[in-house]
Image (spheres, rainbow, N blue to C red):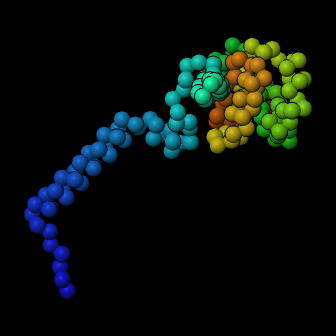
Amino acid sequence: MSSLSLSPSLRRILFEAIVLCVLAATVGLSLNFKLIFNAFSGKAVSTPVIATSVIAETVTENSVTVDVFPVPVELDELDELLAAGALLIDSRNSVDYQTRHLDGAISLPLGELDRGLENFKKEVSIDQTLVIYCSGYGCPDSFDLGVRLINAGYTDVLVYEGGFPEWRDAGRPLAGGEK
């Protein structure tokens, strides 16, 4: 059997490399603790934007296209928004809404938007603050509905990313269905 032995200078270089990697990982984790904690707890990892919508510009050869996206909000921000008159919108399907939904929410399923948008526009002012939710993190319906409502002319559109599961798990009031 042959044994593998390292020269003293190679061992020192290897030791220094390991120390540098451990030091870099420690500094990185300590500087990004909140981001890492949010990622492992299932919360949004992006920093909230202080605006009513996020704007992205796409420049092509002869024109500029402006895309506007709804802003994400957290559970602790909802109380203030609702007290100020924000309207909760459930973007999940009608059956889920009828079974259980956030207390005070109205139903506007993304899948039925083509049929329901005209009535929605008649009932809800274009400058009303809208907070849209669906089935929690990873559910794109609330974001997609928010983009469609912005494209329909609504100016204050927010998305509650925690959605129904986070609201329910926090013990907040629910409506619909049997308790």
Camera sees residue 73: no
Name the residue nearer the viewer: 30 or 61.
Answer: 61
Q: Disc count in the image?
A: 0
Q: Position of residue 101 (x, y in %)?
A: 78, 34
Q: Looking at the image, which residue is at 72% across and 29% down?
A: 146
Left or right: residue 14 versus residue 148 is left
The picture quadrant where one finds residue 133 is top right
The picture quadrant where one finds residue 163 is top right
Q: Position of residue 174 (x, y in %)?
A: 76, 32
Q: Looking at the image, which residue is at 86% across and 36% down?
A: 112
Left or right: residue 176 versus residue 128 is right
Name the residue nearer the viewer: 90 or 4.
Answer: 4
- Image quadrant holding the N terminus, namely bottom left
Q: Position of residue 107 (x, y in %)?
A: 83, 31
Q: Looking at the image, which residue is at 78% across and 15% down?
A: 126
Residue 123's place in the image compared with 8, above or below, is: above
Q: Looking at the image, which residue is at 29% across and 44% down?
A: 24
- Image quadrant holding the C terminus, namely top right
The picture quadrant where one finds residue 165 is top right
Residue 13's place in the image compared with 103, above or below, is: below
Direction left: furthest residue: 8
Direction bottom: furthest residue: 1
Camera sees residue 128: yes
Name the residue nearer the viewer: 164 or 133.
Answer: 133
Name the residue nearer the viewer: 81 or 140.
Answer: 140
